[in-house]
């Protein structure tokens, strides 16, 4: 203990106190404060960034869920639309078919009617022509026959012969 | 850039070395040549003391002439007025220095006033000098080292602080190495002991004391032999600052726990008060003694083991002592950091006690 007191140097104590306190104050201003502030800022920045990332992740998840929902809705809507379209198509085809059938039936009926009248007209025409033709033929034949006696007799005979056969 | 930073302290050191003067003494030593053992003892005792010049090494030539290699430091005395002179006037304690009509002489690394140019130190029966001692504020070797550490720390940490600004909040160069240590002091020493809310106020002191003690301890291990922390004046100063900060930041609860301990019967309160009060002094006192004793003991043991090598002078003893000294040096490196850590942790703990908010019982 005595040695401790003997070794104690007031000058060294005063210098140490002065220099050390000056060092604390100087470093506080020029080093510790800026260093700790920067570190703090950085740490806070990292924390904020992490929070933001977490938030963004959550948002992304929400968005994805929304997207999924929207997609699902769109799919059902599409299916409904397709179904409707298919039904509409079938109906249209059906309608068209009916209409076509009706129209064709009508057309056929019209055609048949006109064919019938044409046929009748043709037949009447034919009849008239045949009648004329046969009168002409008959006239020519009679004129020829009656110019020759023998032939007249022959005709009479063949007619007679036919008549007897009947 | 990084290389440049690393080189700067070395340049500083070299610059210091250029002031080195080559001291050559022609005085024959009056004392009889003592044996090696007491020579080693004296050397260790001398090494542990502060000195007025920066002696890098000295040796004795074959003719018994002592030679010193180093440079003098300014002596500042207050003795009927300020007296400033170079320590080279003492000629390593062999001559009386005459300054402004007063005469001073070195005796066991301390300055005493003597009567005249041939004045002698008068000793009493306990070998204590009875001469008058002037008030001494000299830049001794230890003060010089404190100034050097001051400069190094200021340079290092202000540079580090600037690198944050230049580099978008990221340290560069030395700061890369220093930042984890700074953060360690904050996260492992300050916050757990003082608390998240109040630690900020104490960070400047804790960081400064941690790095100061560490760097100074490391310098103590450098062969030029500067030991600041084995001076009781230095550790007392640091412990006193811790005590003052603790006392001034003590809140109501802190004082209540000292003078009127809650939760114990009244007679116990009366007994506890002086014990607790004494405790507030003992804590920094222990802080002071611990740092002083650890570093001093380390130096004494290390130098004794090196001294053993000189005493043994044989093929087994000398190498063994060198190996031991090497191992011990490594241990001292650990002790240097450990003592800085312990001083800082305990300071933080005391601050924490002073500002702690107790749950009311």
Image (spheres, rainbow, N blue to C red):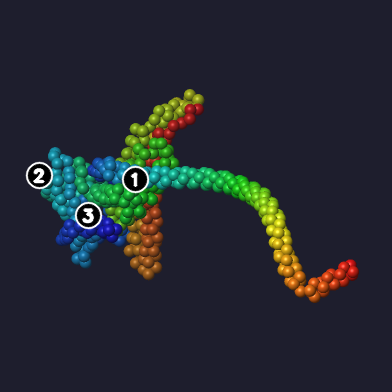
Residue B336 in the figure: left or right of residue A127: left
Query: Which of the 4 image quadrants contains residue A149?
Result: bottom right
Foreground of the two, B344 or B2: B2
Q: Which residue is mark 3?
A: B54
Residue at 56 percent across and 46 percent down: it is A74
- Chain assignment, label 2: B
Q: Which residue is mark 2?
A: B101
Residue B355 screen position, x and y as percent: 40, 34
Quadrant where the N terminus of chain B lies?
Answer: bottom left
Residue B92 in the figure: left or right of residue B243: left
Residue at 32 percent across and 55 percent down: it is B173
Mark 1 and 2 residues: CB-CB less than 8 Å, in contact? no
Residue B15 screen position, x and y as percent: 20, 57
Q: Is residue B207 above or below residue B219?
A: above
Q: Which residue is mark 1?
A: A38
Residue at 34 percent across and 57 percent down: it is B303
Foreground of the two, B141 or A121: A121
């Amino acid at each position: 203990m005595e040695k401790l007191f003997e070794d104690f140097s007031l000058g060294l104590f005063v210098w140490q106190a002065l220099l050390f306190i000056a060092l604390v104050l100087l470093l506080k201003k020029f080093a510790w404060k800026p260093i700790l502030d920067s570190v703090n800022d950085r740490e806070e920045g990292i924390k904020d960034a992490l929070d933001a990332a977490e938030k963004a992740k959550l948002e992304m998840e929400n968005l994805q869920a929304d997207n999924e929902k929207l997609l699902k809705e769109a799919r059902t809507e599409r299916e409904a639309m397709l179904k409707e379209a298919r039904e509409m198509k079938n109906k249209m085809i059906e309608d068209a078919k009916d209409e076509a059938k009706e129209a064709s039936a009508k057309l056929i009926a019209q055609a048949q009617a006109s064919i019938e009248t044409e046929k009748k007209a043709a037949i009447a025409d034919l009849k008239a022509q045949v009648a004329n033709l046969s009168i002409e033929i008959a006239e020519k034949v009679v004129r020829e026959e009656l110019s020759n006696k023998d032939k007249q007799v022959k005709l009479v005979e063949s007619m007679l012969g036919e008549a007897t056969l009947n | 850039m990084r290389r440049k930073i690393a080189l700067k302290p070395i340049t500083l050191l070299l610059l210091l070395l250029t002031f080195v003067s080559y001291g050559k003494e022609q005085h024959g030593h009056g004392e009889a040549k003592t044996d090696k053992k007491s020579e080693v003892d004296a050397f260790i005792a001398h090494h542990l003391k502060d000195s007025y010049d920066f002696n890098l090494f000295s040796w004795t030539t074959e003719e018994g002439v002592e030679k010193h290699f180093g440079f003098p430091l300014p002596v500042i005395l207050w003795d009927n007025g300020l007296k400033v002179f170079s320590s080279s006037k003492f000629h390593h304690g062999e001559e009386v220095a005459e300054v402004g009509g007063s005469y001073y002489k070195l005796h066991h690394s301390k300055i005493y006033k003597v009567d005249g140019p041939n004045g002698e130190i008068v000793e009493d029966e306990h070998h204590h000098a009875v001469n008058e001692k002037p008030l001494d504020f000299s830049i001794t070797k230890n003060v010089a080292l404190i100034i050097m550490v001051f400069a190094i720390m200021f340079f290092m940490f202000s540079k580090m602080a600037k690198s944050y600004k230049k580099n978008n909040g990221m340290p560069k160069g030395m700061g890369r190495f220093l930042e984890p240590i700074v953060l360690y002091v904050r996260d492992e020493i300050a916050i757990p002991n003082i608390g998240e809310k109040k630690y900020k106020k104490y960070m400047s002191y804790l960081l400064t004391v941690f790095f100061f003690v560490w760097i100074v301890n490391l310098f103590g291990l450098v062969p030029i032999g500067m030991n600041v922390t084995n001076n009781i004046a230095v550790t007392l100063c640091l412990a006193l600052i811790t005590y003052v900060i603790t006392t001034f930041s003590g809140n109501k609860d802190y004082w209540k726990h000292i003078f009127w301990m809650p939760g114990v019967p009244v007679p116990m309160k009366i007994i506890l008060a002086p014990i607790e009060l004494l405790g507030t002094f003992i804590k920094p006192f222990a802080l002071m003694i611990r740092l002083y004793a650890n570093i001093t003991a380390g130096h004494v043991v290390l130098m004794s083991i090196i001294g053993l090598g000189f005493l043994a002078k044989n093929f087994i003893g000398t190498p063994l002592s060198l190996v031991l000294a090497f191992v011990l040096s490594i241990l001292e490196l650990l002790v240097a950091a450990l003592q800085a850590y312990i001083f800082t942790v305990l300071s933080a703990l005391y601050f924490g006690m002073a500002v702690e908010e107790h749950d009311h019982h």
